[in-house]
Amino acid sequence: MIDNEDDYFLDLISYDEAASIILPKFRATHDELRYWIKLANDNESENNLFDDTKDYLLPFASEFPIDNMYRRPLDGFFYPEYYFYDKASVLEFIPQPFLRFVYQKDLSGKRNWYDYKRGNPESLIYKTLFRANECGILRLYDHNDDEFRIYANKTQIWCHTFEGESYLNNPDSFFLLYDILNIERIFFKKDKTLCLLELGLPTTHNPNNEESENVIRFAIPRYKKET
């Protein structure tokens, strides 16, 4: 529960209303939105991921205050679609670039994996993702605790499990943009400046970070593979 100043009330909106604002604004998905809410909820007290209030999408269990207090979700129950969100925070929210997702089905269509359409694309994509996880570069999403991890359990990395192999072969599987950029940097020799721009980080040619806003806000840019 969160204390509020006397006579102060939040303008809370439903998940659907929040999604209608955030998803088109950043070309985001419900998978991403769920993850952002989960991280904000988990790290509210620790503040180890977020530097500003615009990074937060804190969920509230009710839009009705009791004695100027708003209920927060109970521990162990995480259902973003059943919670409410501060409208001001939703309007100010900007997702951290290292928390953006890339979907397996978009690798060949929108990034420099397009050559993998030729021959046996599923095998080539799978082998690259498999190898990246095996080398500790790529984290897979653990649906049990809504987090990305290298290891599926104490003894096995994801790609050495049936669940991990299925995930790597699933077109709807998603990975962190940060990990995908590292794969492209290592496997495809992608230009470092392009990677920095996609993460919204300044480059030697962009010291004031002037070009990065559109990358963060309006999806991952397409680019031509260097020859």
Image (cartoon, grey):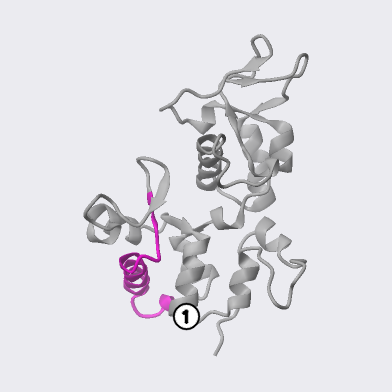
- Identify the residue at image location x=55%, y=48%: 29
> Within the image, what quadrant is residue 162 found in?
bottom left
Relative to 145, does residue 25 appear above or below in the rendering?
below
- Residue 221 appearing in the image: no
Q: Residue furthest bottom?
A: 227
State the quadrant of the N terminus.
top right
- The amino acid on which the numbered mark 1 sits, given as a three-letter code, is Phe
Q: Is residue 136 left or right of residue 38?
A: left
- Identify the residue at image location x=68%, y=56%: 217
Q: Regarding mark 1 in the picture, which secondary structure is present there?
A: loop
Point out residue 202 in the picture as x, y percentages from the top left corner.
Answer: 69, 68
Q: 26 or 152, which is in the foreground?
A: 152
Q: 29 or 147, which is in the foreground?
A: 147
Residue 114 located within the stretch drawn in magenta: no
Point out residue 119 in the picture as x, y percentages from the top left corner.
Answer: 35, 80
> Within the image, what quadrant is residue 129 found in?
bottom left
Relative to 162, does residue 198 appear above or below in the rendering?
below
Residue that label 1 marks: 188
- Identify the residue at image location x=63%, y=53%: 27
